[in-house]
Image (tube, rainbow, N blue to C red):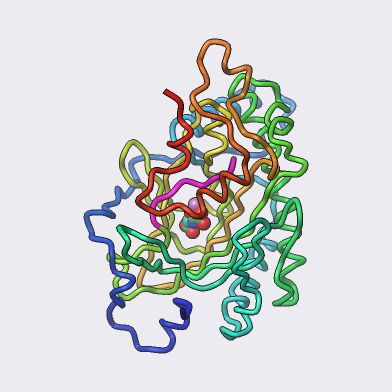
């Protein structure tokens, strides 16, 4: 199957090929959100020695995770220059000839998945649906994989993943406290030293009929926190109180969203947020997404200290098993998270 990029380049596409057209306008109605302000977290406050500032950022995290499952992280300390170079090298990867990219493709569905590229398919009522994106995806922790081309790729991915891991750990310390747990509760319970980290780059070329196509359909992420940056072109939408919100990035911010394992761990206090990627007809969009999860072998269950007054709302499950079930589920099936709900 050709990549979407090749499809767009090989023909003068005026209309959307039918394999990609499955969404009606009404499915995708979006609330433009200038009137709502999305939560912003100032990362530098987490290192503050001023107890009031620290208390404020913990409260901000509690609101952001409890109300939205999403926030924009500012003052995170990851150099803009590193991020710009990373986008450049990802773009160079997708610019390589199709045969070159496919050399990195593996069909091995088991951990560790190394690299896959090309369009994504899924089944909707036994009909094949193609998404308007190409992607590249591989594990970077606890074992590090990366294509050896373009030349700089591996070094940049290594540095970015290390830095996001540090930010992730610190955020989870704050989130632990926001739940009334010890600061290091989550990192210990989730064995973050061997935490799972995936590097994913999504490439969305301009689409002739963006309203009928979808980049990624609505889903939740499987891990604890997902980090997302984009090349200045928007497309991420999150669901909030039943409505879809298009999110505009603040300069040099990172989008962070909560995932299924945080929902389980928090016993449902912090719901995993539904989100999707829409496409546009003007500019290529690239998003770089880093899902951060527990170590592969962790059995995730609701945090014991949260169960003193409330019964457990989720059954425990091994994390890698969870990832594999989610990956092989169909779009119209009951999500694995729902199947773990008790009562
Ligand atoms: C993902 C994802 C959204 C985007 O890769 O899991 O939700 O905007 N991506 O690319
Ligand atoms: Ni996602």
Rendering coords of residue 224 (x, y %): 59, 40
Is residue 333 in the magenta section? no
Of 178 and 332, nearer the camera is 332
Asked if residue 141 lies left or right of residue 320, the reply is right
Magenta residues, as a range? 217-225
Residue at 58% x, 67% y is 136
Residue 167, placed above or below residue 78: above
Among the 4 quarters of the image, the one containing residue 98: bottom right
Q: Which corner quadrant holds the C terminus?
A: top left
Query: Can residue 270 be spotted in the picture?
Result: yes
Name the residue furthest top.
309
Asked if residue 182 lies left or right of residue 122, the reply is right
Of 79 and 311, nearer the camera is 311
Query: Can residue 249 be spotted in the picture?
Result: no
Residue at 73% x, 37% y is 191
Rendering coords of residue 338 (x, y %): 43, 36
Residue at 42% x, 44% y is 274
Rendering coords of residue 5 (x, y %): 47, 79
Of 266 and 109, nearer the camera is 109
Rendering coords of residue 24 (x, y %): 23, 60
Residue at 49% x, 55% y is 328
Residue 102, placed above or below residue 198: below
Residue 72, placed above or below residue 13: above
Residue 197, placed above or below residue 153: above
Please give the count of numbered marks on the rendered protein: 0
């Amino acid at each position: 199957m050709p990549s979407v990029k090749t499809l767009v380049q090989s023909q003068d596409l005026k209309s959307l090929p039918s394999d990609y057209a499955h969404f009606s306008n009404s499915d995708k109605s979006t609330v433009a959100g200038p009137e709502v302000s999305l939560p912003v977290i100032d990362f530098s406050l987490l290192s503050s020695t001023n107890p009031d500032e620290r208390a404020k950022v913990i409260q901000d995290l509690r609101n952001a995770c409890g109300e939205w499952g999403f926030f924009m992280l500012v003052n995170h300390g990851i150099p803009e220059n590193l991020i710009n170079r990373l986008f450049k090298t990802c773009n160079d990867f997708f610019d390589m000839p199709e045969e070159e990219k496919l050399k990195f493709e593996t069909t091995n569905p088991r951990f560790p998945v190394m690299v896959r590229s090309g369009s994504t398919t899924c089944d909707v009522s036994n009909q094949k649906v193609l998404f308007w994106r190409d992607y590249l995806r591989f594990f970077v922790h606890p074992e590090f994989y990366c294509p050896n081309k373009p030349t700089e790729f591996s070094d940049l991915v290594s540095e970015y993943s290390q830095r996001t891991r540090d930010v992730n750990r610190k955020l989870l310390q704050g989130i632990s406290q926001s739940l009334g747990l010890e600061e290091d509760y989550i990192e210990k319970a989730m064995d973050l030293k061997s935490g799972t980290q995936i590097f994913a780059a999504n490439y969305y070329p301009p689409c002739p009929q963006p309203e009928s196509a979808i980049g990624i359909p609505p889903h939740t992420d499987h891990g604890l926190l997902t980090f997302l940056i984009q090349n200045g072109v928007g497309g991420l939408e999150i669901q909030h109180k039943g409505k879809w919100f298009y999110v505009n990035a603040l300069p040099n911010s990172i989008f962070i969203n909560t995932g299924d394992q945080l929902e389980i761990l928090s016993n449902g206090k912090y719901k995993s947020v539904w989100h999707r990627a829409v496409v546009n007809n003007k500019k290529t969009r690239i998003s770089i997404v880093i899902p951060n999860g527990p170590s592969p072998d962790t059995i995730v269950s609701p945090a014991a200290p949260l169960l003193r007054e409330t019964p457990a709302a989720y059954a425990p499950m091994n994390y890698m098993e969870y990832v594999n079930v989610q990956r092989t589920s169909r779009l119209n099936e009951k999500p694995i998270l729902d199947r773990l709900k008790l009562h």
